[in-house]
Amino acid sequence: MQIVDFPLLQASLNSNKVVSSYHYGQPGSGLKVYIQAGLHADEHPGMLVAHYLRLALQQEEAAGNLQGEVILVPLANPLGLDQKILGYLLGRFEQGSGQNFNRYYTDLAALVAGRVESKLGKDAEANVVLIRAAMLEALAELQPENELDSLRLRLQSLACDADILLDLHCDLEAALHLYIHSEQIKQGHELAQHLGCEVTLYAEAGNGQPFDEAHSGPWANLATRFPKAAIPMACFAATVELRGQTDVSSGQAKADAEAILNYLRAKGVLKGQPEAASKVREPKPLAAVEVTKAPSAGLVDFLVQPGQWVSPGQPLLRVINPLGGAETELCSSIEGIVYARNRQRYAHTGMELMFVSGEEPIRSGHLLSP
Ligand SMILES: [Zn+2]
């Protein structure tokens, strides 16, 4: 195991931030896996999972069980973790720019298309090698302009040539759920089975370049740009939403880490027989999610829990105005699973309050919350 501490571009004098990555196994000896946690710095379940992964991977490596390369970044966002404002950790957006830490990653397809165009052929494996080398080369030539750019560039440089990428996040109050690319439904379902995850949501790239899409999306994009070349979806990338923000416990984190290790065993990255995966619901379109928003401001009384099945017409929540006394009950219009809800109990008008995953697409355009 090797620890690499990478200094980010300094935003202010004597304010150095570092991204630490833990490298296990040998590059080129098998699949490359990249796992990071805490890209949104106020999402801590994944950081605790990474803690247990770090301990376990150390043991697996020492026992000679590693048949590939794993890079683990347990704390992917030292900038966000340092943003304490009026007593609260502000971890989703960078306070200087207002930008979401999980958006605006470099469009790798656009970055390498010109470099690889004349060299692509019918050999898929050769194309993957060529494209990955071009990604690494092109990223190495980019000059970050500020600390946030430098963070994004570092993470992308570690991850861009991975075969498997897991970005560990969490929601506000939620059941375990996954986001994947629509061309990786089978791979997403396999991961979900190992994690015991009932809600896997797929979409095409086009939601503001979050980290997972920025690594799976380029392969679909390049395949469309160069239809005569054989270009596979060489990076399976998933955002793993490890329940809600306060779901941080050693017991749960150990179980989640063990589930990820089992998945790595199933993928041949670790030696050993994986435990049997569970039977879970098939992946569903992200466009089939019904988002319930507050029609007016008021106190929120949730009537259903994350993980609960609901049917059309079933009340999900009430918004109560303590001044006029109006109580507005909001119902599901679809059958599906409640997988996330807001953490706040006072809603401003238009606030997203509850998310139900159904079967049929009912939304279009940008599908992720800001
Ligand atoms: Zn997040």
Image (cartoon, helix red, strand yellow):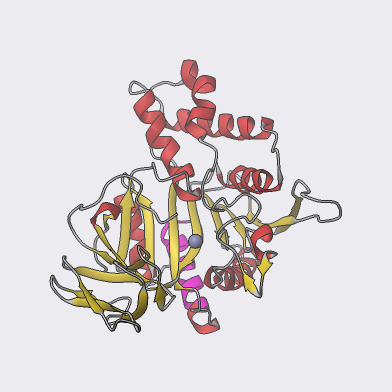
Which quarter of the figure has residue 75?
A: bottom right
Task: Name the foreground residue: 54 vs 81.
Answer: 81
Which quarter of the figure has residue 71?
A: bottom right
Identify the residue shown where x is 42% and y is 40%: 217
Q: Is residue 126 above or below residue 2?
A: above
Q: Which residue lies furthest to the front in this view?
A: 324
- Judge whether residue 262 is colored magenta: yes
Task: Name the foreground residue: 11 vs 4.
Answer: 11
Q: In this view, does 215 lie above or below 78?
A: above
Residue 105, given in percent of the width and then of the height, sits at: 54, 43
Q: In which quarter of the image is the N terminus?
A: bottom right
Identify the residue shown where x is 26% and y is 80%: 326
Lateral position of residue 62 relative to residue 299, left or right: right
Lateral position of residue 7 relative to residue 354, left or right: right
Task: Name the foreground residue: 130 vs 240.
Answer: 240
Identify the residue shown where x is 68% and y is 44%: 150
Dominant SS of magenta comes to helix
Note whether residue 312 is visible: yes
Q: What stretch is highlighted in magenta?
A: 253-268
Residue 164, given in percent of the width and then of the height, sits at: 47, 51
Q: In which quarter of the image is the C terminus?
A: bottom left
Q: In this view, does 191 lie above or below 361?
A: below
Note whether residue 272 is visible: no
Q: Residue furthest right?
A: 14
Residue 25, given in percent of the width and then of the height, sits at: 62, 55
Residue 208, given in percent of the width and then of the height, sits at: 45, 44
Which quarter of the figure has residue 216?
A: top left
- Judge whether residue 185 is colored magenta: no
Looking at the rendered structure, the number of numbered marks drawn on it comes to 0
